[in-house]
Structures are given as structure tokens and as C-alpha cells.
Image: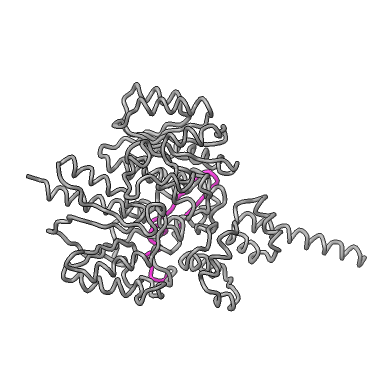
Amino acid sequence: LCKMAKSDWTCSLSAICEWESPDYEPSLPVSEKSNPLTRDIDRASANSIVKMLQACDTQMFQEETESTYHVRAFHKHLLTKMDSKSSRNNYLNSGFNRALRQLNQSPVYSYIIAGGDRCVGVEIAPFVAGQLDFCLQHPEVYTPVLVGFNPAHQARDEPLPGCTFTFLSVVQRMQELAKSHQAFLINPAVGPEAISGSSRMKGGSATKILLQVVLSAAHAAAFSHTPVACNLSNLLLYSMCFSLRCGRRVCYLGWGSLALLGLIDASECNPTFGADFEDVRGFVSGGYRELNNKEGPLTALGPEFCIAHEDFLHQVLPRLTDKDTVLLIYTHSDDVGKVVDLARRVREKMANLHAVYHQTDEDTSAALKSIASLSLSLSLSLSQQWELSTKLVLNAVSTGAHVLKGKIYQNHMIDVQVTNSKLRQNENHIFTLLYLSFPHWIYSFKMDAVCMRSSPCPQVVPLALVCLLTGCSLREAESHLERQPVVREAVESCLQLDLTCECTERSLVSLNVR
């Protein structure tokens, strides 16, 4: 069992493995199950949140038991080209193209994102299924590789808009071709996400690990002729939460490949937590030149697409106060002199400046520590370990900050826009868990109509949850959430208020009788 005191949290082995039982939320695929380790994360302290997320990440590296599913191993194959469909990891492939150029080889990696570069952080299952179907129709050209974290039989079998096939039927065709190594399915068991309904944490980390392992092995074959300090993470988490609760912002200023991780983490906060694009933003040294994306600079699309450090200096820094949080992300291989210069400019404007860095010399480290309030040093040797450890830190602090802000119910993401069928199914599942259900007539509405009506409305699901759990009106629910943003606390305060009113009413009736 998991135990949580006011200041600490521990868990047993049984809680870590509970999700593997066939009786645990059997109707849900693994990636959509709630993780027993984080069942009370919405009530946890910053210290406990960090430990919970660390325990969930550890599940990725545990040996599989007999009850979990296994991956078919394959080897002796040279991977020469991959069109990745995971929009959060697509840009990372450009790093392997740089490695090829350093070896005087032509770049062979490319990416495809549904909706183009502007839609990074958004996943569209019909697009992925369509791309796989196209590859399967041209086996002489493509070798499709599907990466996922559910058993193949749990793929969705619902109709896809504009298609004559379902995702499950595509997966089944790939399974047949996998027998002759014409296609590959890579679906390891990494356990449920820390926040149910989101795939940005373990799903993103495991995808990144798989891509780097496979592509690094391919490079090696073709061209062969320390734990994170929890205390500092806690303080960083508190700082970010303070900024978000005050209606202020968090900015990641990054260099090199670590900057991209900050950009991705920031882009995921909107679909996961219903955050505004101004809440958490990522900025990259070199902007789109460093990103090296297909469509080039996207700044003309609006301020949310301005990602260079220059954009931060001109558009954002003048408006910052001490209630905002700025996080520097860099390594010793970056131009550390520019890091220090930018840190000084930020510090002149506001005090809430922090840093996450890898292996800098003592002089630079001392200079940054004299400027930054918190400096989290990660001592790892390989650049890919730098990236993974940085991703885990950013995921932990951004998730924890939104948890403390009240964006989670138990361990389910709820403050999201109901913009597609997957999100609607996720929210329906929450109500089902609470023994609640929508009236039958609601399901007669078409999905696009539901999305159109709900998209402009803030806090659709939290408001519905408070109304259904307490029986209060919409206006009363809004009032409760304004006073107490943590949904579970808002529900309890509402129920307690009703109980108090009921007791008062009974007392008055009793007095009148007397």
C-alpha cells in the first residue's frame, strides 16, 4: 500500500505492481489506467509529488513479470530511415542528422507531424493510422515501425473520420507483416502514467529512449570501419507553482538539445493541464535556426510561435516580475558565457531565476550560483543521459506545479478542453469511476458538436465534476473553484458547507418546534 504523511510518502512493492493484475481497471488499455502510486497526488506535498513521479518513472526500468506482455526482439537489421509519427520526439531526430553530417554522410532522417510544425505537442490518431496504412500499401518503399505502450489487442476499434479502417485493423495488418520482418511493433510495458490520460511523461521518455537506442545502434553498426536531488526539485516545483497560482508565468531558457526538451515540455502543458500558452513557455537559443524544422520560422503565426531568446528579451522580459519563474537549461558544451550574460539581464529584472545544468567548470558554476536562486546540477557522462535526466526533471516540476495548482483530480487530468473522442472518453471514465454517468441523450450528440460547444469554455470538466458530486449550481461551482482550485478540496468544502447548513436548518427547526 502507499502511505502518505504530511511531509513524506512511501510505497510498497505491491502498490508498484498492482496495475499488472488482470482485475485492475480491466476495461482500460495500460496507458489509460490510473497509476496506484499517484492515487492521492492531488493532496500531496511537493516533496511527496517528486517521490511519486520518481517511483512512476522507475516502473519503466523494472523487469517484466509473467503477467505483463513482452516485446518480440529483433536484430541483425540496419535501420537507414525512419519517419517518426510521435510529434513530441520528431524534432529529436535532427540530432542524428547532425551526427551524420559530422561523419560526412547525407542526412536520412525525416519527420511528419499531423498539421505541420505548428502542431507539435498534439497527437492525432487518425493521421498516424493513415500514415501506417500508406506505408503498408507500399512495402517495397517503407518499413513501418509502430511504437506504443499497450498490448496490440487494446488498440482502438472505433471508426476513424474519413477512413474505412480502424486503428486496430491497421495494427493487426502490421502484426502479420511483423512475422516476416516487413513491419515492426515495439510495445514494451512501462505501466500507467503518473497522471491518467496523459502520455507525455513515461510515454514520451520511453519513446525517446527507444529512438535513441535503436538509432544509436544503427549508427554504430553502419559506421563502425546520479540521482536527481529531490530537495532542489521540491523548491523549484514550489517556485513554479507559486508563479502559476499568482496568474504569472514560467519561462524555460535553453541551449542546444536541452532547449528543445524545454520547448516540448512547455507545449504539453496546454493539452495536459488546460494551461494558457503564456503559463509555461520555452525559448531556444538560435530559435528556428537551431530547431531546423521543415517549415522554417513560424513567428508570423503569432506570439506563441516566437521561441528565440531574442523574442524572450524583447517581448517577455520587460513584463516579468518577481512572481514569475525563469529556468536556465544548459550544459558545459554550450556557450556558457552567453548563459551568464543572459542570466544577469534576467536577474536585473526579477529575482526568481533558477538553473538546471550539466558538468560546468567551477568558475562558471560559481558565477551562476551567485545569480540563480536555485542551481540543480546533474552529473552524468553521456549527452543522451543529459537529455533524459533533464526531461524527467522538467516533467516532474511542471506536472507537480500544475498538481499543486489544482489541475488534477486524484491522479486524472481534468482541466482539459474536450476537443476529441479520446479526451471525451477519458473524462467519461472519471465520472464512471465516481459512479456518475451522463444522461443517455448526451451520447447522441456528434463529437464535432461537443468539441465546438465546449472548446471556448474554461474548466468544463472541473465545473461538471463539482456540480455532479455536490448537486450545486454552476455559479456555486465556479465560486467554490475560485476559492479552492484543488477540485477534491472544493468538493469537500462544498459538501461540508451543505452539511453545516443542514445542521443549522435542523437546529432552527428544533427551536421553532420548542
Residue 52 relative to residue 503: left or right: left
Q: Is residue 157 magenta?
A: no
- Eyeballing the image, is 334 above or below 87? above
In the rendered image, the residue lying farthest to the front is 300
Residue 319 relative to residue 69: left or right: right
x, y percentage for residue 216? 20, 48
Closer to the camera in the image, 75 or 125: 125
x, y percentage for residue 184? 22, 65
Quadrant of residue 505 in the image? bottom right
Q: Is residue 19 magenta?
A: yes
x, y percentage for residue 102? 18, 39
- Eyeballing the image, is 21 above or below 494? below
Closer to the camera in the image, 260 or 53: 260
Name the residue rendered at 21%, 64% in the picture: 142
Closer to the camera in the image, 284 or 351: 284
Q: How many marks?
A: 0
**Residue range corresponding to the magenta coloring:** 1-23
Question: In which quadrant is the C terminus drawn?
Answer: bottom right
Quadrant of residue 186 in the image? bottom left
- Eyeballing the image, is 203 above or below 133? above
* Colouring method of the image: one colour
x, y percentage for residue 129? 33, 68
Name the residue rendered at 31%, 25% in the picture: 361
In the rendered image, the residue lying farthest to the left is 225
Name the residue rendered at 73%, 61% in the picture: 498
Closer to the camera in the image, 136 or 66: 136
